[in-house]
Image (cartoon, rainbow, N blue to C red):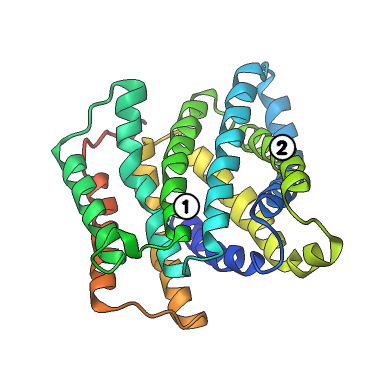
Amino acid sequence: MLFAAFLWGLSFYFQKEAMTHVGPLLFTGLRGAIAAIALLPFALRECRQSGEGIRPIARLGMLGGGVFVVAGGLQQAGMIEATLTNTAFLTALYVVVTPFLLWLLRSEQPGARVWISAGLAFAGIWLLGGGTLSALSNGDLLIAASSLFWALFMVVTSAASKFGKPLLYTFIQFVTVTVLALPLAAWQEDVNSDAIMAAAPSLLFVGGVASAFTYAVMANVVRFIEPSRAAVLLSTEVLFAAGLGYVLLGERLGAINWLGAALVFAAALLVQVANPRPKPD
């Protein structure tokens, strides 16, 4: 999980780099296509080995793909304006949101620590904006909004875990992403081959490694731990992404902004020990 988080953190850099060449929907659709192609042989083998029908997992895969398009599209659009550091920490809000979605959808009431983490997260966002929410850019707000859908994506992925077909689920998810995002990109964005070629290195890394590999890992891991704890392990991606923003892009935060980032991350960590559940044998 930590290695997957590292790859995700690295992918933030490549995702932001790609936004200088292609639009958010085009990037989302192409990463989905690359991931689906990479996963196809593994998904077929998993399907043959199980010998069961795919209708239930297909429904969840399509739902997960639809949620992914919204979450990924919002995040990519936000990256055009937001810094890599803010992108990382604001995306981590999905860790705090996930327990509340579980409460809403599964009646799994969050404990006191989850409520405390929500307060810490809000304070952290306020400080990331320099002590005023109005200082957050439109890109920051889009990324914060995407965290709500990433939390929903975690819940859907957790629901799919009971079928024991993580690779098939992830494949169907990315096929759905491709089918939904590419037509929308053709309708809303400028699509040309030169721009796609310029973004190709970023697309190959994000699609083949940070999507096909890491999302398959996540879909497999949530078979054994609840989504809130999986989200926390994966949230360490923000530290890797923030470090890359510091080293590669020269991004610097003021003291009050770093305090806000620390509070957001502390909120994510606090969720890990809230309402713990034993790992199944």
- Asked where in the image residue 204 lies, by quadrant, the reply is bottom right
Q: Secondary structure at mark 2?
A: helix
Q: Residue at x 28, y 34 (%)?
A: 278
Q: Secondary structure at mark 1?
A: helix
Identify whether 231 is placed above or below 170.
Answer: below
Q: Position of residue 54 (x, y in %)?
A: 67, 20
Quarter of the picture holding the C terminus = top left
The residue positioned farthest toward the left in the image shown = 112
Q: Position of residue 175 (x, y in %)?
A: 71, 37
Q: Nearer the viewer, residue 183 or 159?
A: 183
Q: Is residue 33 left or right of residue 209?
A: right
Q: Nearer the viewer, residue 158 or 248?
A: 248
Q: Is residue 178 left or right of residue 147?
A: right
* Crowd tier of the residue under label 1, counting other residues whose Cα lies within 10 Å: few below 14, some 14–19, many 20 or above: many
- In the picture of the structure, the residue carrying the numbered disc 2 is 175
* Crowd tier of the residue under label 2, counting other residues whose Cα lies within 10 Å: few below 14, some 14–19, many 20 or above: many
- The label shown at residue 142 is 1
- The amino acid beneath tag 1 is Leu
Identify whether 110 is placed above or below 202.
Answer: above
Q: Nearer the viewer, residue 245 or 226?
A: 245
Q: Residue at x 56, y 48 (%)?
A: 72
